[in-house]
Image: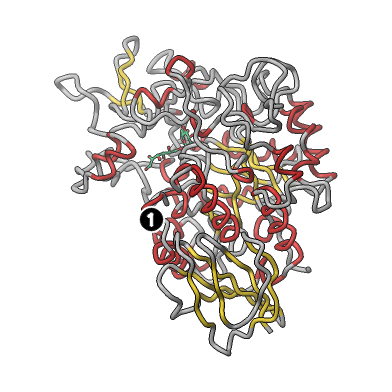
Amino acid sequence: MADYLWWKHGIIYQIYPRSFQDSDGDGIGDLQGVIDRLDYLNDGTGRSLGIDAIWFSPTYPSPMADFGYDVSDYEGVHPDFGDLATMDRLIAEAHKRGIRIILDFVPNHTSSQHPWFLESRSSVDAPKRDWYVWRDPKPEGSPPNNWIGAFGGPAWEWDQKTQQYYLHSFLVEQPDLNWRNPEVVRAMHGVLRFWMKRGIDGFRIDVMDRIVKDPQLRDNPPQPDRRWAELIGQTALQEHKYDQNWPEILDAVREIRTVVDEFPERMTVGEVFGTPENIVRYYGGARLDGLHLAFNFALARVWDRRWTAEHIRRKVDEFEAALPPGAWPNYVFGNHDVDRLATRLAGGAIGQARARVAALLLLTLRGTPFVYYGEEIGMENVDIPEDRLRDPARRYGRGRDPERTPMQWTRHGGFTAGGPWLPYGDLKDNVEDQSAQPRSLLSLYRRLVWCRRRSDALRFGDYAPVDGTPAGIYAYTRSHGDERLLAALNFTDDAVTFDLPASLHVRECVLGTHEATFAGQTIALAPNEGRLLRLG
Ligand code: ISL
């Protein structure tokens, strides 16, 4: 394929490095552990998962106030994970197997222990004072504006020594960088070049939608719709008009793109929230000179009640319609910030059945699939005893430990020789057993991935939803040249039978969530069954 592009046509697998594989028995995952597991991810054959790239949540030196999203050195590796030499070996070993490496780039804030911030807070005249956002209090001593941090509480912290407030959109330990200062921009661009020279293939950009704010720092208006506050906490009490999605961010995005384009075949995917129209702005408009991909979280927000054919189809079609010409979609079902997919889809037997439908959907839609580690074996949220919870965000609302637990390799765990930093979930769902079971979710994932890898229609063909299917059924075609496939998914707990029009002539069943192989114009789907059919 002449225009094959790994980040478009491949599958991106997210690893939370603390929880994937520990190699030295300290109970915390590390990069050597990942190297040891690369063949699981892709050994070039259908025995492996067959992914094309790994995105690592942060691996940098950090006091771990927010488990690495508080970076104290952008050009190093946290000793828990290894060192630069281990990272170099990981890059080389991954590349040998055709796996690309994407690092998490955290531009909005550093750790409060970063030398830049230590200097900035040392005095109002410090050369790096303006690298962060410092402001005087209001006359009565209160913070400069009403902004609420993403985890809750005021977004401003008072500094006794220098008698000013600093801005932190997240924890107090995560002061916001000032992207209006050209020295900051230069330093952060230098970080991107540092890693690309070492062979890093791309960057997942953290809170891309907040790096530049209103220059006047105006008060955010209240959010009239209070429903979200119950789900994501205090931050949803405000409309983030002045501290999120500020238009000037797009200039910063374009500059980042220019730097990334200095190196061949590199990519960026940014974390952006909001409506599809807002998200696609970050691709850069008609010139597509912004991000390569902006995360589409529509399906990561789907839980039980929204798991309907109609809702899912609407979300897919909305994103497809919003994209500027030539821009490429992507789909995310889970990550380190949201409840596990199988749990959101009601958990237990129903959650597992729906997770199979979700796998078929994710791997047959048009767009880059993101797979969060453990999704392929149906890992669920883990109920963690109070005294073992670690995520600081739990103090402000929802803690994220339940979706960050160790990868379940065997019936005994297999993640570490020591005591794992977070407890394991239900080890009956594990890689070893599921590898041996042809009907397991893992076996389905492998079949789907390798089918996608071999199919031009699935990797880059057109997408067209099929109208007129019965309630609860979502069907769409994917076509490229002579190859035409049809995915038919039953989102209900009932069996559904329907006839396809003659224009969609079924030739054979390629694969499915169930054993059924019968292919004809009458499609009879069992409850929660999905099937991929070849048309001719
Ligand atoms: O503000 C939000 C939604 O409007 C939040 O969802 C927030 O943007 C989101 O939690 C950002 O997450 C990322 O940055 C955080 C880190 O804790 C998360 O793990 C990371 O994914 C701070 O770096």
Residue at x-position 56% and y-position 22%:
422
Q: Position of residue 319 (x, y in %)?
A: 46, 64
| Residue 141 vs residue 393, the one in the foreground | 393
- Number of labels in the image equals 1
Question: Is residue 254 in view from this perspective?
Answer: no
**Residue 288 drawn at (x, y percent):** 55, 63
Q: Position of residue 378 (x, y in %)?
A: 58, 43
**Residue at x-position 28% and y-position 27%:** 154
| Residue 159 or residue 522, whichever sits in front | 522
Is disc 1 placed on a helix, strand or loop? helix
Q: Quadrant of residue 235?
A: top left
Q: Residue furthest left?
A: 140
Where is residue 82? Give x, y as percent: 72, 22
> Is residue 21 among what the camera can see?
yes
Q: In the picture, which quadrant includes the N terminus?
A: bottom right
Looking at the picture, which amino acid does disc 1 mark?
A: Arg
Which residue appears at 64% of the width and 77% of the height? Answer: 479
Question: Is residue 219 or residue 431 the one in the foreground?
Answer: 431
Question: Which residue does the numbered mark 1 point to in the structure image?
Answer: 306
